[in-house]
Amino acid sequence: SSSSSSSSSSDGNDDDDARMFFPFRESGDLIRASPQRILAETARPLPEGLCGGPAFDDAGDVAGVVEGIVPLTHGEEVLRGAASFIPSPVVNDFVQWAERAMLERVVPKEVFDQVAEVKEG
């Protein structure tokens, strides 16, 4: 659940988002899994606003990132309303790639080479 109110910033912008968001927990059962995507059945479709949030496994470890919800109109009935997650290894690979690409553009080559060497072990 969330509450919202409007606040005015010092620059006069009244569009600041002042909503408060509370932790949300919904258990689910895996329906399908691939290296790129995990689908889980939940008691009800996840509410809006959870995309980008963590998905935890039974041990409490982050297993992925919420990607979205399969539309209730999907042709395959078992998938309707399922939660879709990007597995954490895929997210980690992307973050590593993005970090490397950004560093390569913003730091001198000799510094980049040193950072890359440290990160590679």
Image (spheres, helix red, strand yellow):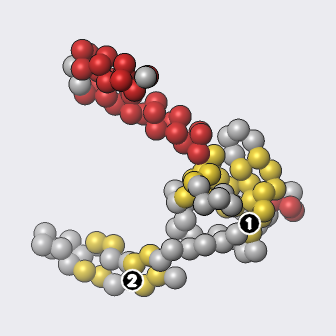
Q: Is residue 17 visible?
A: yes
In three-dimensional space, the C-alpha distance between marks 2 and 1, rounded to whole angstroms, equals: 29 Å
Q: In the figure, residue 18 lies in which quadrant?
A: bottom left
Residue at the image position 43 percent from the left and 22 percent from the top: 120
User: Taking 51 as reference, is 100 left or right?
Assistant: left
Secondary structure under tag 2 reads loop
Looking at the rendered structure, the kind of residue marked 1 is Gly
Callout 2, which amino acid?
Answer: Ser
x and y, in percent, of residue 64 in the image = 60, 51
Nearest the viewer among 75 and 23 is: 23
As drawn, the residue found furthest toward the left would be 10
Asked which quadrant contains residue 12, the reply is bottom left
Q: Is residue 81 visible?
A: no
**Tags 2 and 1 touching, CB below 8 Å:** no
Within-10-Å neighbours for mark 2: few <14, some 14–19, many 20+: few
Q: Is residue 38 left or right of residue 52?
A: right
Disc sitting over residue 4 in the figure: 2
Image x and y of residue 71, in percent? 72, 62
Decide: is 5 above or below 99: below
Residue 50 — which label?
Answer: none
Question: Residue 16 location in percent, x, y?
Answer: 28, 72
Q: Residue at 53%, 34% (x, y): give it.
A: 93
Apparent side of residue 74 relative to residue 57 in the rendered image (left or right): right
Count every numbered label the image shows and give the total.
Answer: 2
Q: Give the mark nearer the N terminus: 2 vs 1.
A: 2
Q: Label 1: how many residues lie within 10 Å, few (<14), some (14-19) or many (20+)?
A: some
Label 1: element kind = strand
Q: Nearer the viewer, residue 36 or 63?
A: 63
Q: Where is residue 91, by image quadrant?
A: top right
**2 vs 1, front mark:** 1
Q: Which mark is residue 28?
A: 1
Q: Position of residue 53 (x, y in %)?
A: 52, 60
